[in-house]
Image (cartoon, rainbow, N blue to C red):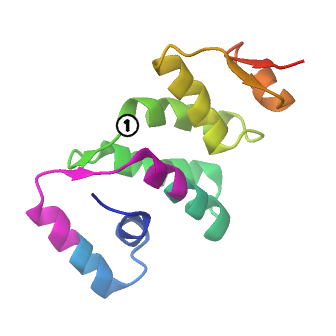
Amino acid sequence: MIDTNILLDWLLDRDPRRTAMVEKLFAAATELHIPDVIIVELTFALEKFYDLPRDIVAGNVTKVLDEPLFNCNRNMFQRALGDYVQYPSLSFVDCCLMHYAELQNALPVWTFDKKLAARSSAKARLLK
């Protein structure tokens, strides 16, 4: 299992020494698990800490999802990334929530968030 900083070093080459260590780990591994929360934190860090635009954030997350070495929730995150780029008023967490609920047959998502309900194609409903 790997954490967010491993992915950030791999994607951004923040420290050449650490990036080399990450590459060595990846070369030796047959599979590395990435929990959902790490992908969410990665997206948050790229957007908020590194101040990258959503399309660049999505490109970096797609690089993670496209790496066959990683065992992660590709289906949900690939779906969520499309909404994340298309709807700037929605957070990545909101986008994940909609697709998680859909994949788990747990719709609708009840919310007080008017933007989420408006952009969710009836997947989310306002609690009134």
Mark 1: few/some/many CA within 10 Å (<14, 14-19, 20+): some
User: Where residue 116 sits: x, y (%)?
Assistant: 76, 29
Quadrant location of residue 29? bottom left
- Quadrant where the image shows the C terminus: top right
Residue type at mark 1 is Asn
Residue 30 located within the stretch drawn in magenta: yes
Which residue is at 63% across, 69% downward? 49
Q: Residue furthest right?
A: 128
Where is 33 relative to 81, above or below?
below
Quadrant location of residue 2? bottom left
Count of marks placed on residues: 1
Which residue is at 82% across, 32% downward? 113
Is 68 on the left-hand or right-hand side of 41? left
- Quadrant where the image shows the N terminus: bottom left
Is 23 on the left-hand or right-hand side of 93? left
Q: Main secondary structure of the magenta part?
A: helix
Is 22 on the left-hand or right-hand side of 111? left
Is 4 on the left-hand or right-hand side of 1? right
Q: Residue furthest front?
A: 128
Q: Nearer the viewer, residue 127 or 81?
A: 127
Where is 95 relative to 103, above or below?
below
User: Where residue 39 sits: x, y (%)?
Assistant: 46, 51
Q: Nearer the viewer, residue 11 or 72?
A: 72
Which residue is at 43% across, 70% downward? 12
User: Where residue 127 sits: x, y (%)?
Assistant: 84, 20
Where is 79 relative to 91, above or below?
above
Residue 106 located within the stretch drawn in magenta: no
Which region shows up in magenta? 23-41
Q: Nearer the viewer, residue 77 or 35?
A: 35
Q: Secondary structure at mark 1?
A: loop
Q: Which residue is mark 1?
A: 73
| Residue 85 seen in this snapshot | no
